[in-house]
């Protein structure tokens, strides 16, 4: 029997993808779930800016592993096709090097002919690397992503497998073992940046992202990622769940080390048997919980941890179209390792930069007025540990980036922009309660992954659970949606005596 219908009341703080996915799972299991969202709209980093007839997805644009969403709908007996449509995107990314040559990164069948031209001696190595990432994916994604890792023993158990899979190597080292050409090393090693990790620091297990892309492709939701957010919200509402926007949680109420509810900034108290926080663990523990319930050394961990980079995102719409541009373009600057060193370790904003350019109207013209084009350009920058004053430098920074695009990739841009806006590290902090204004919470280095990452179930406060980028398995849509399953399984185990295999 699946449903014990406990009818426990659960408050989920935040409506990011992790919060929404957990809400669907828990509501489906018979819990009485309410999501409280601080902003005036849902989606978190995947919110949307609608402006002057353009639709700009604020954050995620690349959908890998669409099956994780399909599973959520199937769980509730629904068909995802009745809620949202996905388009395949090809190539996955066009990667421009600093000399303006490019590589269209895609499925290996399309990559190999390009490698044959660029660096024939790397073809065999590339094929070997593809074979090597398969077991990493099978272990890392299919198995470890869904394990709770709340005891050290669970970590010890997987250690031999991690060693076998060369997780002690950095992602860049792993790629370099198979590939000699510097350009190709960049093309096949940038993936950890998509989840907030420096390819030179995070373990090679994150090469599994390449495998996800190879097996399942890259997709874009019709109407933008926001339509996927709203599809999940619709499913949650149909299951009987409730979402309240403009409701910022100020405090998690605790008695005798057990949650009792939350207090919002408007002074409202909402009682709950369980709380699931979809916000940064650092923010949850250091800002929402009275210090008397926390062990001092635990909070110190958050100020000392290694955090992901932040981002500047510039959204802009043009009255001119650029049919030669691809949907996803990565523009690499003159430096790779050194630039990442500046961003992640030295925390300095360099003169040079690398970026990701999103042109969704290449796939879905409905996102801009007819004959127009919608864009965003994302630039990794140091998080707020740097000394940069974004209130002062945001506008000159934006001008510099747009000028660069005008000169190098989008001729006539400056004369054709009809609307724009910018998101800086300060907005990440203010809008998403992101500790240090990071784009992706804790950096997924080995010592902050799996058991070493903040646990999905609080160790010292009963009834408090975490979901989303800062907990296991980590950032990115596949990560946060998987974290919702881990968290739900832990709740079901604790309160419903349930058998994990019931829950796909
Ligand atoms: C610009 C950008 C591009 C990205 N691109 C991709 C991509 O292409 N593909 C991909 O897979 N991943 C991508 N990512 C990563 C991915 O978007 C995130 O890892 C993921 O969306 C984070 O989801 P989350 O569940 O952790 O919650 P979040 O999105 O962080 O949501 C947390 C929510 O909590 C709310 N909140 C905060 N404080 C409070 C409070 N006190 N009370 C109530 N609510 C509160 C916030 O408003 C927010 O809505 C991108 C990220 C960014 C920033």
Image (cartoon, rainbow, N blue to C red):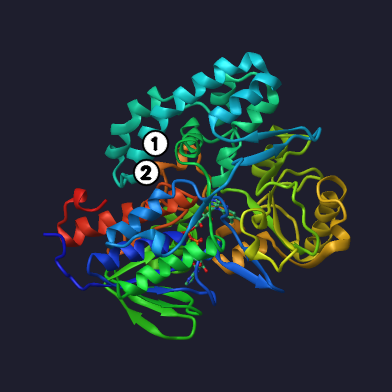
Task: Answer with left or right where residue 52 lies relative to residue 150.
Answer: right
Q: Is residue 177 left or right of residue 381?
A: left
Q: Nearer the viewer, residue 296 or 58?
A: 58
* Vertical comparison of 51 with 196: above or below: below
Report the residue at 44% width, 46% height from top. Answer: 65
User: Mark 2 falls on what kind of element?
Assistant: helix
Mark 1, residue position? 140
Is residue 380 among the parts visible in the rendering? no
**Sooner in the amino-acid sequence: mark 1 or mark 2:** 1
Residue pointed to by mark 2: 145
Query: How far from the left and from the top, in percent, is residue 292?
Result: 38, 67
Residue nearest the viewer, comparing 502 with 199: 502
Q: Farthest residue to the top: give it.
A: 121
Q: Position of residue 240 (x, y in %)?
A: 30, 75
Image point (42%, 52%), residue name: 471
Q: Is residue 324 left or right of residue 385?
A: right
Q: Nearer the viewer, residue 448 or 69?
A: 69
Q: In the rendered view, does 297 fall on the left or right side of 119?
A: left
Q: State whether residue 79 is above or below residue 305.
A: below
Q: Residue at x 16, y 70 (%)?
A: 5
Mark 1, residues whose alpha carbon is within 10 Å: few (<14), some, or many (≥20)?
many
Q: Are marks 1 and 2 in contact (CB under 8 Å)?
A: yes
Q: Is residue 243 visible?
A: yes
- Mark 2 C-beta to ligand 1 under 8 Å: no
Name, please, the residue furthest toward the bottom: 267
């Amino acid at each position: 029997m699946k449903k014990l219908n406990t009818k426990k009341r659960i408050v989920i703080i935040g409506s990011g993808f992790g919060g929404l996915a957990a809400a669907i799972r828990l509501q489906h299991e018979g819990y009485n779930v309410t999501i409280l969202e601080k902003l005036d709209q849902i989606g978190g980093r995947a919110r949307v800016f609608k402006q002057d007839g353009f639709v700009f997805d604020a954050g995620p644009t690349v959908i890998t592993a669409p099956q994780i969403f399909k599973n959520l709908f199937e769980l509730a007996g629904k068909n995802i096709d009745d809620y949202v449509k996905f388009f395949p995107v090809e190539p996955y990314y066009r990667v421009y090097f600093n000399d303006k040559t490019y590589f269209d990164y895609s499925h290996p069948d399309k990559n190999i002919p390009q490698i044959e031209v660029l660096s024939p001696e790397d073809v065999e190595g590339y094929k070997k690397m593809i074979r090597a990432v398969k077991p990493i994916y099978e272990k890392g994604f299919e198995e470890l992503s869904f394990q709770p890792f709340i005891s050290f023993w669970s970590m010890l158990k997987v250690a031999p497998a991690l060693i076998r899979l060369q997780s002690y190597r950095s992602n860049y080292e792993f790629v370099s073992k198979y590939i000699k050409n510097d350009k190709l090393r960049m093309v096949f090693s940038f993936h950890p940046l998509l989840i907030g990790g420096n390819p030179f620091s995070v373990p090679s297990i994150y090469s599994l992202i390449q495998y996800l892309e190879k097996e399942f492709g890259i997709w874009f939701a019709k109407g933008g990622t926001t339509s996927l957010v709203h599809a999940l919200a619709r499913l949650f509402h149909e299951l009987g769940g409730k979402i309240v926007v403009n409701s910022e949680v100020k405090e998690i109420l605790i008695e005798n080390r057990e949650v009792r509810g939350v207090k919002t900034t408007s002074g409202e108290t909402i009682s709950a048997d369980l709380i699931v926080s979809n916000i940064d663990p650092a923010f949850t523990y250091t800002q929402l919980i009275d210090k008397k319930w926390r062990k001092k050394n635990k909070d110190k961990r958050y100020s000392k941890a290694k955090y992901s980079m932040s981002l500047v995102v510039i959204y802009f719409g043009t009255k001119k179209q650029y049919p030669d541009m691809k949907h996803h373009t990565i523009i690499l600057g003159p430096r790779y390792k050194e630039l990442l060193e500046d961003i992640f370790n030295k925390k300095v904003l360099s003169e040079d930069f690398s970026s990701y350019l999103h042109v969704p109207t290449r796939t879905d013209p409905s996102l801009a007025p007819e004959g127009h084009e919608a864009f965003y350009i994302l630039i990794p920058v140091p998080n707020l540990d740097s000394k940069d004053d974004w209130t002062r430098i945001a506008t000159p920074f934006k001008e510099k980036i747009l000028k660069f695009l005008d000169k190098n990739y989008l001729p006539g841009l400056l004369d054709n922009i009809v609307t724009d806006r910018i998101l800086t590290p300060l907005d990440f902090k203010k809008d998403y309660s992101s500790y240090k204004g990071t784009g992706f919470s804790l950096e997924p280095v080995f010592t902050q992954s799996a058991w070493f990452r903040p646990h999905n179930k609080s160790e010292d406060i009963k009834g408090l659970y975490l979901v989303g980028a800062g907990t296991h398995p980590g950032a990115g849509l596949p990560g946060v949606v998987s974290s919702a399953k881990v968290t739900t399984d832990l709740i079901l185990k604790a309160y419903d005596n349930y058998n994990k295999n019931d829950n796909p």
